[in-house]
Image (spheres, coloured by chain):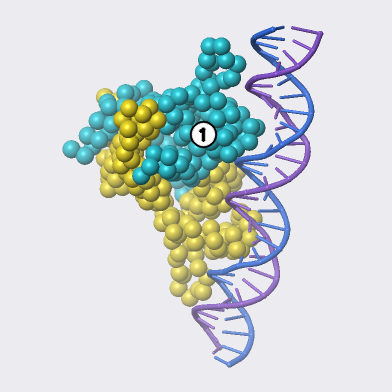
Chain colours: A yellow, B cyan, C blue, D purple
DNA sequence: TTAAACTTTCAAAACTTATTGAAAGTTTAT
DNA sequence: ATAAACTTTCAATAAGTTTTGAAAGTTTAA
């Protein structure tokens, strides 16, 4: 396969994966573009490469910075802003895990612990079923949270060797 | 908190979480409703509880069956179909992991391994950067895949005790 | 200053996805 | 066979999300 075709395919696949996981397609595509680009790119170049508008490019770049996935770079003697992506895939995974944990898992944990406090008649099947489901989900969510916490602190090789030891 | 209020809150939270993770909100809500219901419910009851149309209820229930999260139940002497959810949270987690692995991770792995075969000039920074990113993502995805594979086969308590040993 | 270079904003439009509801289809009991 | 009970389909519509692009805002150099 040609490099140019491969790049397009990668950008498309990354965009599709993103949208299946609740991440805006364009955002995933811009990220993909920067991931495979050896140099930092300008807004103009990104607009051009992906055929997107200035407004869209600007907002998407802002969001990606918010996710900690890309950074601005200034080149001496130039006014333009350049953008580049962290190329360390383990950092990327951690960054995404960190943000989703904060934005989604933590609010859910909070609600679950609130819901765990519901009181009622232990003889009522409605109450018993509710309580059991909520408690079970709560326990699972706490384990997921702990695992993510470990991942956030860990070096890649150590993390995977630990997790994959499970196969031994 | 009252049981009735807690139920509503649970359904709402589950729906929101679902939509953040690329799962249709209504589908997540119907699942939540069945999860906390001690008895199987009819389409009618589900429509009523969540104020959704018959068509929507029917399609959503079908999708949930497709995901292996709920089942139809027939009651002796009744024509109506009843639906109930598997209440084992570990089974649910495995089922979701299994489906998403199949629907999303596997296609991506396939593309990544194709993209790994791109050939080019090792001196070209464009080529080097592309290759490195694709290879690194590929390795990470393979580890994720292996971990999910283990999870799919594992008992809950064994899986988490293995994974959480990482803390020792 | 001024104006060119560049960035940000946001209302309107385009696109995507979810939902409705009525009609068609199916099954069962009589 | 018929009709009642129930389920499924799908075209139309609504709701939600993303994108555009022109105008407003900002920064820099001269």
Q: Is residue A157 left or right of residue C25?
A: left
Give A119 or D19, whichever is nearer the viewer: A119
Q: What is the number of callouts on the image?
A: 1
Residue A139 visible, this orientation: yes
**Left or right of D7, for residue B38:** left
In the image, what residue occupies the spot 49% across and 65% down? A82
Q: Position of residue B25 (x, y in %)?
A: 53, 41
- Asked if D13 appears above or below C6 in the picture, the reply is above
Q: Does residue B99 appear to the left or right of A165 in the view shown?
A: right
**Which residue sits furthest left?**
B168
| SS assignment at label 1 | helix
Quadrant occupied by the C terminus of chain A: top left
Q: Position of residue B80 (x, y in %)?
A: 59, 19
Please tell me which residue lies in front, D14 or A69.
D14
**Residue in view at x 22 percent, y 34 percent:** B165
Pinpoint residue B5: horizontal percent, then vertical percent. 42, 43
Q: Relative to B153, is B26 above or below?
A: below
Q: Is B40 above or below relative to D28?
A: above
Most foreground residue, D7 or B2? B2
Q: Which residue is drawn at 63% across and 57% down?
A: A52
Residue carrying label 1: B30
At horizontal 51% and vertical 26% (from top left) the residue drawn is B41
Inspect this view and state whether residue A33 appears: no
Give coordinates of residue B96: x percent, y percent.
45, 31
Q: Which of B129 and B94 is in front in this view?
A: B94
Q: Mark 1 lies on which chain?
A: B
- Mark 1 Cα within 10 Å, few/some/many (few <14, many 20+)? many
Location of residue B60 by image quarter? top right
Quadrant in which the N terminus of chain A is drawn: top right
């Amino acid at each position: 396969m040609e490099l140019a075709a491969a790049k397009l395919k990668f950008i498309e696949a990354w965009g599709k994966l993103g949208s299946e996981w609740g991440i805006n397609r364009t955002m995933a595509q811009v990220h993909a573009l920067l991931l495979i680009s050896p140099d930092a790119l300008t807004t103009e170049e990104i607009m051009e490469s992906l055929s997107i508008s200035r407004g869209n490019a600007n907002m998407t770049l802002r969001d990606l910075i918010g996710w900690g996935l890309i950074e601005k770079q200034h080149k001496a003697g130039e006014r333009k802003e350049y953008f580049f992506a962290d190329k360390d895939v383990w950092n990327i995974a951690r960054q995404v895990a960190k943000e989703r944990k904060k934005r989604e898992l933590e609010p859910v944990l909070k609600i679950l612990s609130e819901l765990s406090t519901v009181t009622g008649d232990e003889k009522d099947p409605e109450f018993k079923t509710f309580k059991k489901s909520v408690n079970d989900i709560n326990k699972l969510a706490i384990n997921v949270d702990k695992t993510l916490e470990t991942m956030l602190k860990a070096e890649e090789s150590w993390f995977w060797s630990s997790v994959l030891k499970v196969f031994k």
